[in-house]
Image (tube, rainbow, N blue to C red):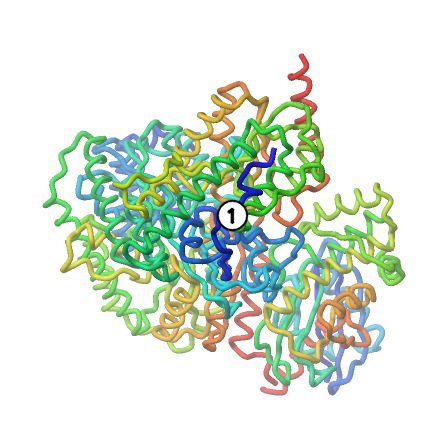
């Protein structure tokens, strides 16, 4: 599916009728590619990513190869090793929200008894599935780590579409047994996925996919390192690269795009020193309303110096068997175990990027990232870093109160700027 | 009525150490074998919010109530707490508990969310580690203790299933009281609470009560509305009684693997896969005659909320009406809730009488 | 040299005029549908009271929800900073501010001089705010002042457990239907607000002295309930409702003095 900052280019084309007919026509993609080539992008690599996203979307809707849906953080090296088209319905939900099409999907899901307290990403996915907006999956790959909601959503989608659902169960503790358990599941999934897609599993292709994934990782580390030198990019633009993180690992093309990003980062001049305060941004953003982050970064002149989502949390995959490496990667996420561990990572990121404060966009339905947010806030504050939780929703605009959010954000910035000292 | 194990003596000495746990996926056999009295920690329903408020308002109210219970010391002195990582809320509870309460030591237990050979192998390894941390001797000495505990619980569950299972004529509130008494001290052979202190089972239509953690006041409410709870499929109800096939382990199978396999194959909680939940509920519908289903989800329990639309469809296929109730652990039986259950009871009564 | 602070809240608008650190005059009125009109009117009212001409104002700071709709303001500052500043002026030793406004309640922990160290605000919904009390008073068919009086008269409190304004309202309705006295319900409502407020206080940490500001500080029932919950006496400004506007005026003054 197309990426998130493309909405200006895409909205006009798609909004009039997000019909699968339109999305299945190669002409749509020709037109959109033209639009992408001639539109303004904040980064040259954003354009590269948009073209990559368009290509993936075209593949998904035109059925070049079997389509698998993957949930965020599923090791996509496996479907890429099979040459499958990887589709992230969660990213697609964000796109629907940015196009103003999420509400009808949310309504549809609610009519089918999906409760409003559930994560809106997944309600939107369920609604869009019921409405037939998304490309038909051959298989569904869901991981249970970080999100309780995704595997259940995927299982339901499997029942609705008839596609086979694979569930990766990831333990919390990093032990050799946990690695072995995950590796065994991944091996089974790969074998059965190949059978479902009527393909042959070639172990050497997984080696290639893991190599591409490693190049991806190296490029992401390089881009993040360059950003320590204060690259003047906007956090709201950088959050869009989460798309590659979710679908591109294991794909040589995605690795190439990320490598371009690292090169572009290295070429950038440093951010002007006047930009203050400097913030570490947690979780995502309200996709239906870009004005909150525009206000923060444009009008208020604050700088998002790094985003938690872009942190390379996983170790290098080199030197171990591919299965073991992928198992380690799934176990490595810093927000999957204790709040103490997550807080420690956030504090070190804040120090590394010289952030003055930490802001979390607390997505209402996300139990994993927001369930212990007061404890997280306390732990971060104990290290001398002010912490703000902006309670909102990434997809569902129906309870959105922009003034409330802005007041909290403003008060936080004032606090950081120390304006009240007389 | 009261089964024999309540008034006889097993000759097992009462353990002095107490190990608290929250989730019924915690194998109590290991705690007992290691010399701990297992105590399932059920927070009082009216505990309010914990202070300082570490857990967010949009997190499961049962997990929040557990933390409040700990902060207020409602369980007295405990020597150990085992937190099973059953769901995100319990993992946050683990973090918050450790940050708030310096003692007793807290042990984190990973529990797979699926069954099968690989999951059981992994879980068995977790159980082996738990046993060793708790000081269960290795080798044959430990094996004897564990085998004794396993066999004792197998016997106990078989008896309890007779007393508290779907064919029991006792009321659901009473059945829960019996289960608690048995849970508190299986080794001490407690006396079951007298039946006459509890309301008898209503004579009305039988329903199947399911969901995640179904609080006591919902069970009472359902009975007050004249519905008989044929199956109380919840942590405080009969769900933990359905641990695997209950066959005592043969000499061949590793004891830890046996426990792991049986716990992962037991009547599934919504934390397990949707597929396993639906398969289980289908088998229940076939084996237990009932007129309808009441589904209770705690607010913000993602698992229970996600399952409902599909569970509902399964009951509908079987021609059974279903209602969805959603509430907070602390005050689930509100006026609105009563109206819903009463209306459902009226609907079933009409169908039942016609 | 006159400085003005204007606080446009969701329910009421306040203006304070300041000369050499002293309050010349203030005005309070309902915000109504148009924030901009409310800002103009409330400032006019204060100017009339002080017999000062608009041209004499050196700087204006606007705060509150409507702060962005005051085009003639020199600067916009949030109510968090303004309440801290206003309280520091009135109670130099204060370390914690509780402000319960129309749709937001907030707790501010501050350093001497009014520097904000941390703050916590209510979750998205209006539970525990002025709006919550207003809705509940309506369900009891009394005005806000009577509600406070009723609460103070009660010997015990009805349990209002719902977090949500909508559900709490129906809880109140069913309590009335059950024949619970209005005093007990009013007391229960004050306790419900106090409970939520105490949770916010504990999020930033309780540090005395504690000052309460905002319209709800005039509600003796809520004040007593919060005091009981926290085990701490609350200090109240002579006119709690204008603290934000006062802080805004003080910020206007110090910004000009700095230049």
In depth, the one of A382 and A297 nearer the eye is A382
Quadrant holding the C terminus of chain C: bottom right
At which x and y percent is residue A321? 15, 53
In depth, the one of C104 and C56 nearer the eye is C104
> In this rendering, is residue A296 above or below B84?
below
Query: Would you say B310 lies left or right of B197 here?
Result: left
At which x and y percent is residue A124? 45, 39
At which x and y percent is residue C124? 60, 55
Query: Would you say A215 lies left or right of A1 here?
Result: left
Query: What crowding class fits label 1: few (fewer than 14 Cα within 10 Å), some (14-19), or many (20 or more)?
Result: many
> In this rendering, is residue B222 above or below A292?
above
Q: Is residue B63 visible?
A: yes
Query: Would you say B162 lies left or right of C84 here?
Result: left
Quadrant holding the N terminus of chain C: bottom right
What kind of element bears circle 1?
loop
Q: Name the residue under label 1.
A: B186
Residue located at (30% from left, 69% from top): A227
Q: Quadrant of residue B228?
A: top right
Q: In which quarter of the image is residue B174?
A: top right
Q: Is residue C58 visible?
A: no
Q: Quadrant of residue A262?
A: bottom left
> In this rendering, is residue C100 above or below B302?
below
Chain bearing mark 1: B
At which x and y percent is residue A363? 49, 53
């Amino acid at each position: 599916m197309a990426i998130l900052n493309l909405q200006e280019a895409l909205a006009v084309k798609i909004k009039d009728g997000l019909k699968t007919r339109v999305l299945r026509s190669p002409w749509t993609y020709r037109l959109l590619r033209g639009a992408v080539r001639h539109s303004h992008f904040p980064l040259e690599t954003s354009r590269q990513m948009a073209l990559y996203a368009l290509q993936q979307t075209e593949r998904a809707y035109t059925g070049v190869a079997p389509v698998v849906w993957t949930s965020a953080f599923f090791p996509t090296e496996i479907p890429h090793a099979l040459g499958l088209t990887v589709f992230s319905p969660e990213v697609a939900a964000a796109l629907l929200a940015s196009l103003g099409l999420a509400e009808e999907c949310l309504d549809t899901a609610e009519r089918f008894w999906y409760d409003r307290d559930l994560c809106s990403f997944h309600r939107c996915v369920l609604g869009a599935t019921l409405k037939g907006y998304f490309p038909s999956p051959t298989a569904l790959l869901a991981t249970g780590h970080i999100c309780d909601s995704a595997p259940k959503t995927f299982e339901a989608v499997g029942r609705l579409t008839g596609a086979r659902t694979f569930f990766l169960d990831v333990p919390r503790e990093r032990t050799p047994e946990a690695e072995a358990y995950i590796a065994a599941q991944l091996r089974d999934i790969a074998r059965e996925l190949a059978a479902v897609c009527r393909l042959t599993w070639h172990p050497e292709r997984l080696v290639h996919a893991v190599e591409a994934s490693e190049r991806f990782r190296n490029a992401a580390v390089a881009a993040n390192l360059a950003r320590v030198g204060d690259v003047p990019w906007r956090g709201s633009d950088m959050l869009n690269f989460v798309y590659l993180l979710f679908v591109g690992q294991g794909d040589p093309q995605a690795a190439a795009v990320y490598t371009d990003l690292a090169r572009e980062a290295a070429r950038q001049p440093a951010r002007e020193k006047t930009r203050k305060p400097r913030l570490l941004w947690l979780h995502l953003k309200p996709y239906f309303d870009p004005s909150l982050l525009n206000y923060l970064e444009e009008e208020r002149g604050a700088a998002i110096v790094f985003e938690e989502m872009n942190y390379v949390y996983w170790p290098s995959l080199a030197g171990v068997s591919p299965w073991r490496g992928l198992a380690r990667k799934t176990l490595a996420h810093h927000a999957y175990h204790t709040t103490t561990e997550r807080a420690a990572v956030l504090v070190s990121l804040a120090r590394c990027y010289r952030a003055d404060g930490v802001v979390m966009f607390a997505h209402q339905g996300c139990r994993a990232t927001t369930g212990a947010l007061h404890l997280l806030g306390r732990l971060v504050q104990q290290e001398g870093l002010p912490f703000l939780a902006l309670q909102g929703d990434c997809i569902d605009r129906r309870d959105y109160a922009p003034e409330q959010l802005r007041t909290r954000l403003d008060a936080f910035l004032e606090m950081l700027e120390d304006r009240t000292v007389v | 009525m009261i089964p024999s194990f309540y008034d006889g003596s097993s000759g097992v000495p009462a353990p002095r150490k107490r190990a608290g746990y929250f989730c019924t996926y915690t194998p109590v056999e290991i705690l007992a074998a290691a010399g701990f009295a297992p105590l399932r920690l059920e927070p009082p329903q009216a505990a309010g919010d914990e202070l300082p408020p570490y857990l967010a308002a949009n997190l499961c109210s049962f997990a929040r109530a557990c933390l409040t219970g700990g902060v207020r010391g409602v369980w007295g002195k405990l020597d150990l707490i085992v937190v099973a990582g059953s769901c995100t809320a319990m993992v946050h509870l683990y973090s918050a508990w450790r940050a708030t309460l310096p003692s007793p030591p807290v042990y984190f237990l990973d529990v797979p969310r699926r069954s099968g050979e690989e999951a059981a192998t992994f879980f068995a390894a977790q159980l082996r580690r738990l046993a060793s941390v708790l000081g269960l001797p290795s080798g044959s000495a430990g094996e004897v203790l564990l085998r004794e505990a396993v066999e004792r619980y197998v016997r106990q569950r078989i008896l309890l299933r007779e007393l508290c299972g779907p064919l029991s004529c006792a009321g659901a509130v009473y059945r829960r009281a019996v289960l608690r008494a048995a849970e508190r001290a299986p080794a001490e052979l407690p006396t079951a609470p007298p039946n006459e202190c509890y309301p008898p089972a209503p004579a009305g239509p039988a329903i199947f009560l399911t969901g995640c953690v179904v609080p006591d006041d919902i069970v009472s409410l359902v009975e007050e509305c004249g519905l008989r709870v044929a199956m109380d499929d919840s942590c405080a109800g009969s769900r933990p009684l359905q641990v695997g096939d209950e066959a005592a382990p043969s000499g061949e199978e590793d004891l830890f693997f046996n426990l792991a396999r049986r716990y992962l194959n037991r009547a599934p909680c919504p934390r397990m896969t949707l597929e396993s939940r639906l398969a289980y509920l289908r088998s229940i519908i076939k084996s237990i005659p009932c007129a309808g289903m009441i589904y209770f989800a705690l607010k913000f329990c993602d698992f229970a909320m996600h399952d409902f639309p599909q569970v509902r469809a399964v009951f509908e296929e079987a021609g059974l009406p279903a209602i969805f109730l959603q509430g907070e652990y602390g005050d689930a039986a509100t006026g609105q809730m009563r109206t819903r259950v009463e209306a459902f009871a009226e609907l079933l009564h009409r169908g039942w009488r016609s | 040299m006159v400085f003005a602070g204007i606080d446009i809240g969701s329910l009421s608008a306040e203006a304070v005029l300041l000369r050499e650190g002293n309050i010349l005059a203030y005005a309070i009125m309902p915000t109504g549908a148009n924030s901009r009109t409310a800002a103009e009117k409330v400032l006019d009212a204060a100017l009339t009271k002080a017999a000062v001409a608009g041209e004499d104002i050196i700087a204006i700071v606007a705060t509150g929800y409507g702060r962005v709709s005051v085009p003639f303001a020199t600067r916009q500052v949030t109510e968090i900073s303004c309440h801290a500043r206003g309280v520091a002026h009135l109670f130099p030793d204060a370390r914690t501010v509780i402000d319960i406004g129309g749709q937001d309640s907030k707790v501010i922990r501050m350093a001497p001089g009014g520097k904000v160290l941390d703050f916590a605000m209510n979750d998205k919904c209006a539970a525990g705010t002025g709006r919550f009390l207003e809705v509940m008073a309506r369900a009891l068919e009394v005005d806000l002042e009577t509600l406070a009086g009723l609460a103070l008269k009660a010997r015990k409190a009805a349990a209002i457990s719902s977090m949500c304004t909508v559900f709490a309202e129906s809880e109140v309705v069913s309590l009335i239907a059950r024949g619970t006295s209005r005093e007990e319900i009013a007391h229960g409502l004050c306790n419900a607000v106090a409970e939520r407020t105490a949770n916010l206080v504990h999020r930033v940490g309780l540090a005395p002295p504690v000052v309460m500001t905002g319209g709800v500080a005039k509600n003796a029932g809520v004040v007593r309930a919060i005091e009981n919950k926290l085990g701490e006496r609350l200090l109240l400004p002579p006119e709690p409702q204008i603290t934000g506007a006062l802080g805004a005026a003080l910020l206007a003054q110090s910004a000009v003095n700095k230049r």
